[in-house]
Image: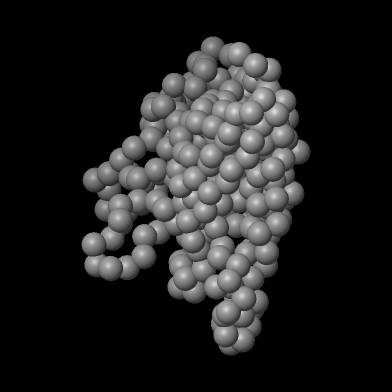
Amino acid sequence: MTTTPTPPNTNPPMYQSLEPLDRQHHRNLKMKEGVSPVPRAAGLNSLFLAVVEFADACKEFPIVFVPVGAAPTDGSKQAIAPLAVLGLTPGTNLFIKDGVWTGRYQPAYLRRYPFVMARLEGVANDSMAVCIDSQWEGFSETEGLPLFNDKGEATDVMTNAHAFTESFEREAERTRAACDHLLKYDLLQEMRFEATLPDGNKLNVEGFLAVDEKKLAELPDASVLEMHRNGLLGLIEMHRVSMGNMARLADMQAALPKA
């Protein structure tokens, strides 16, 4: 299963070449109308999901957790991140057909493309800036909606994109905090999903973490109350409900045309 987000100094999934957005260097940059970012996710069987998205996403995708970043050497737990599972085999996204998103809900990670907030190397205070994927075919200097006007000021297109990427980063930070709380209660265990397709082929999905029902049931009342008040209990319940979508994805996999 593909893990995301990626470690620093690498391009995140979907992005080929990150470039800080600059009002002078990109003063003529435009976004073509009608060019969708969806095809860029066609080969991804999972995408990062912020906790604010769980309520919508749990109705459609399995929500799992995966280890991210380097494993710590001080004995502490490795960081985790939630993913929306979009396919049960590598390189398969069951929610994209002919370059069109077919699901009811589209993760914010995909909706923010081709923009992203990224840390700039060599800049004081570990500052972040809006970056673009300069390799996206939707950018042009001759046609489309401009990002900046003749005075170098941001247009509505740029203003909206900036606001969305900043909001996404805030929610990503909230997600990291929620995952830290989840690790504190030591509720996750390695899981695997197995299914037999109508043609007899077997699907085995592993490498992800899910809540251990036994550990959850054995939590002391004080911990349960604390989790209820900080919202973690609700997130766990949405995660648990979402796991029923694994069987739905297996049915979608079985319905794919045979090569």
Q: Position of residue 187 (x, y in %)?
A: 51, 68
Q: Where is residue 185 in the image (x, y as percent from the top left)?
A: 49, 74
Farthest front residue?
A: 200
Quadrant placement of the C terminus = top right
Who is closer to the viewer here, 104 or 88?
A: 88
Who is closer to the viewer here, 256 or 138?
A: 256
Q: Where is residue 46 in the image (x, y as percent from the top left)?
A: 54, 39
| Up-down relation of residue 74 to residue 128 (above or below) | below
Q: Quadrant of residue 154?
A: top right
Q: Left of 222 or right of it: where is 245?
A: right
The residue that appears at 23% across and 62% down in the rendered structure is 73
The residue that appears at 49% across and 45% down in the rendered structure is 206
| Up-down relation of residue 118 to residue 27 (above or below) | below
Who is closer to the viewer here, 99 or 165?
A: 99
The answer to whether any part of residue 126 appears in the image is yes
How many marks the image carries: the answer is 0
Who is closer to the viewer here, 232 or 149?
A: 232
Q: Position of residue 254 (x, y in %)?
A: 69, 28
The residue that appears at 24% across and 67% down in the rendered structure is 74
The residue that appears at 52% across and 17% down in the rendered structure is 137
The answer to whether any part of residue 148 appears in the image is no
- How does the figure colour the protein chain or chains? one colour
| Up-down relation of residue 40 to residue 233 (above or below) | above
